Amino acid sequence: MKNTFYTLFTKTYHLGASSVFSIRFNLPTKIVFERGAITKVGFEAEDLGKKALIVITRGGSMIKFGYLGNVRLSLESRGIKYVVYNNVSSNPRVDEVEKGVEVAEKEKCDFVVGLGGGSAIDTAKAIAATLGSGKPFIKYLRREKEISAAYPVIAIPTTHGTGSEVDKYAVVTDVERKAKLTVISRHIYPKVAILDPETTVTLPPQLTAATAFDALSHAFEAYINRSTNRLARVFAAESMKNIVENIEYAVKHGLNIAVRTRLLWASMLAGLAIDLVRTALCHAMEHPLSAFYPHVHHGLGLSILMPAWIKFTLESAKEDFAEIAKILGLKTEGLTIDQAAKAAYDFVADLRKKVGLNFKLRDLGVKAEDIDAMVENAFTYMKALIENNPRVPTKEELKKIYLESY
């Protein structure tokens, strides 16, 4: 990493020195990162409450692999009661949040545990915010009301993708508007993030690759977007390096705890990066995709859109992408900035194939006739992320990016 940090701290950025040194960073989340950490949930929960609502998705993997059992035993060892809420889909919806709130109120829970991927953790945050602030969740999601408080949250990620355990965001689908919207509030930072690499070894190969691409997209978008700063770039650079060095091996050798540790570490760092500076156009395009097609995994959608997004953005951020090429370990000596930036694009396009994600939107059942509506959806609900991109597309240009990924 020596060369990477030398680049980060000695280079004059096109953004200007004052821009990249404008930093506000406060993380109220206690991070516990170690093997076996899932067995310490009870200890970390002792000061947070007496009864937990444990939020998991309905897929059953948390039960199958014993992770829910570990959490339950740990809470029981400290005399903490709990109730499990498992009515959560892979792209959580408003009604699922509201049902979780009803369960928590009925059972008199006073804190929330999110166990699983970003869907479970984001739902836990949304439930906690609704419990603490008192109005229907839809009002916070549509920004008709401000979140004023939230019940404490413990986040336990079992994937290495979203970084939701260390950020102030919760993404939930507003079914009525057919849109994935983001709640943003300092109140929903988890009180504790428990990152145990052992909980990620059961991810199957495709999900291993897709979640790692989610984190890689976070890192890329944080590094090049209009809001970026030097601290976000430090997090993003370290994240990228760890992902590209470990993703292929993890896909082929999923039980290797060393590579899983590196990927979970990278996911957390990318989460810290986007907590600072948000994402950009790639996420602005994926959210309509998985809002229209809820079966599409967020990370898989990002991996499909990422090459076309990079190609579109390249000319407006070629210095940044040239730096990324170096971070990725590519040989850039003797290359022009344009050539080095193009090398980063080529690397991502090739990496998708190597890890089994060589899909197009049509392969996921996406209909070409829905693309116009997805473009309108992005410009209606994702304008802030679109405008955070170095190159801001017109609607026609956005449609072309979707079609290039189709």
Image: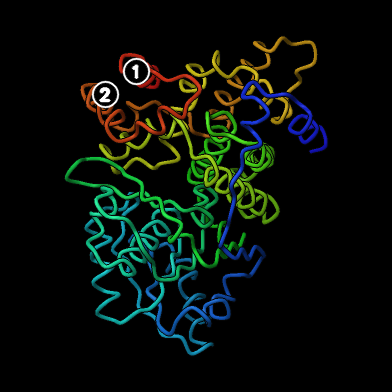
Q: Quadrant of residue 343?
A: top right
The C terminus appears in which quarter of the rendering? top left
Q: Residue at x 55, y 63 (%)?
A: 193
Which of the pair 307/341 is nearer the observer? 341
Of helix, strand and loop, which one carries label 1?
A: helix
Q: Position of residue 57 (x, y in %)?
A: 36, 60
Image mark for residue 371: 2
Tag 2, which secondary structure?
A: helix
Name which residue type carries label 2: Ile
166 up-or-down from 371: above or below: below
Residue at figure coordinates x 40%, y 59% from the top left: 120
Circles 1, 2 touching at the beta carbon (< 8 Å): yes
Name the residue carrying label 1: 403
Foreground pick, 163 / 128: 128
Front residue of 121 and 228: 228
Task: Give the residue type at disc 1.
Answer: Leu
**Quadrant of the snapshot with the N terminus:** top right
Return the disc, 1 or 2, that comes first in the chain's sequence: 2
Q: Residue furthest front?
A: 18
Quick check: 173 above or below 34?
Answer: above
The correct choice, above or below, for 397 with respect to 387 in the image is above
